[in-house]
Amino acid sequence: MPSAPPPGPADPWRAIGVGLLNLSGLGLGYALVRRPLLTLLCWVATGILLFTVLPADPDGVSGTTLVVYGLFLVLTAVHGAMVGLRNRLVWPAQSPLAIALGVLLLGVPVAGSLLYESARDEATEQMLLDRLDTADDLVRKASGESFSTTQSEYRRALSAYDDLSTDHPDSRAAEKVPDRLKTFYTTVGAPYEDQEYCDAIAPLEYLRTVPQTLSKKDVGSLATWPDDRLATSLYECASGTLASGTGDWTDHFRDLLNEFPDSEQAAKVEPDVKTAVDKAIKAVGGDDPCNAVQQLESLSLQVKGLPGEKAGVDKALADDAARADRSASTGVYTCGVSQYEDGEFADAVTSMNDFVKANKKHKNAPRAKKIAIAAEIAQEVPAAGKKLPTTRTGGSITVTVKNDSPDEIQVMYTGPVTGTFTLKGCGGCTSYDWSRTIDPNFKPCSGGKKYPQRTITLPVGTTYFLHKPKGGTSSSPASDTAKLQSGYIYTECAYVTKGLGINS
């Protein structure tokens, strides 16, 4: 028995039916004309296509794959039509029914395409949700870490949220972005909730820039979320630093007064500054007056740099700076006394001279001059600095100081009485050879010349003298200690020795 009926007359409608049935990709046209191998070939081709494109990928099917499979279907349709032209169908017997069935089965690839697009859309949604999860992981991992080291992770997460919202606004992932931003803000601003105000400043300043990156719709009310928290952090950090005196507070107060001049926090700035100035003024009379003076000088400069205009506190701040200046200027006297008592005589000289220069009419100016003299003598003769000099003058003992040197000299003395005067250089005098001065019979100021001289009266007791050359000479200062007693007349003589400086 033959496997197939003999070829019959040509039937164009049957050819069309077989071709349409092959377009479904299932090879049904070949099956109905008894071509099992060709039918199997169609199944294999369609199976390869399904294996290639499933599961659905967000990128879809490549164009090459579609073109190759499309050409394959066209070829099977044309070839099937040629075969079906003279070969009878196993079923159905009538050609119009085969055509109708072929047209109906064309819905298979159409429905498959629709189902594939739906699966592809779902794959895209899952991909976007995965991106959202990745961004969330970045935020979670950065939580609790220093903002300076995790800022890049926060930026990457924010960029991912922005891409989802901007490039895929209708996706399920984009719908979740506003809620994720709330978590993002609370995570970045966590140091504020922990009252770590100095650490909270940088992340809160960063959060204020987020609306420049994301849409207003996504950010919503979060746009102003950092403002009050930042104002509080700026104030608390600067206030704590100002009170402790351990760091620079001006930048934070400056930012607060510029960015939030009408805030409650800005209104607290000037009272805090006033308290700090008062504290430093009080400290001038404490154990470390010099440090207090330095603090006042620093406070004055820092307060002058604060922008109080917007907040309406510029006048009050100017008054605080002026009080700090005045107290620092007058406090230099107390500092100089402390330096003198601690044996820091060079610093005491500088402090007292600065005080007198800035406060010529101050009640302590006369004594400050005498302390400066005594401190300069004490640098050469430390015993001279054991007691603070007074403003006492005069005495019962006559002391005449003569200048047997060509240099103009400044004579300083301290003890029961402190003072200074200048003697002009001796016109006919010269330096003495050092070897001559060690002769027991050496007597300066005894050549019968008219030596420049001055007579002063001093009380009984020990007086320390310092002869200091003036006019840029290379001669060195010389000192002398005189124990003055009643009933005597004393003479001091200043002269120059070659190579060894001035001696008296």
Image: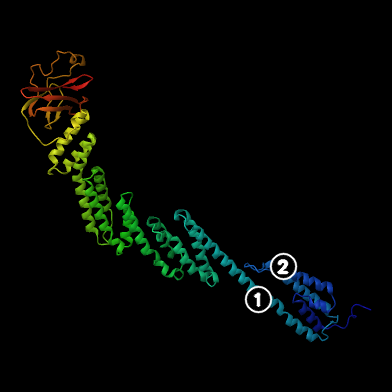
Q: Inspect the image, locate mark 1, and give the three-letter code of the amino acid beneath it.
A: Leu
Q: Quadrant of the N terminus?
A: bottom right
Instruction: Look at 37% across and 61% down and name the residue there.
Output: 230
Classify residue 391 by image quadrant. top left
Relative height, residue 194 to residue 86 (above, below): above
Classify residue 226 by image quadrant. bottom left
Relative height, residue 425 to residue 45 (above, below): above
Relative height, residue 413 to residue 64 (above, below): above
Q: Earlier in the sequence, mark 2 or mark 1?
A: 2
Residue 255: where, in percent of width, then height? 33, 58
Report helix, strand or loop for mark 2: helix
Residue 309: where, in percent of width, then height? 26, 60
Give the camera-side residue of 116 and 61: 116
Task: Name the mark on residue 51.
Answer: 2
Give the camera-side residue of 15 and 294: 294
Q: Residue furthest right?
A: 1
Left or right: where 489 falls relative to 77: left
Which residue is tagged 1? Answer: 114
Visible residue check, residue 500: yes
Q: Residues within 10 Å of mark 2 (few under 14, many from 20)?
A: few
Q: Are marks 2 and 1 in contact (CB under 8 Å)?
A: no
Measure how far apart labels 2 and 1 are at the Cα level.
17 Å
Left or right: where 96 falls relative to 184: right
Q: Residues within 10 Å of mark 1 (few under 14, many from 20)?
A: few
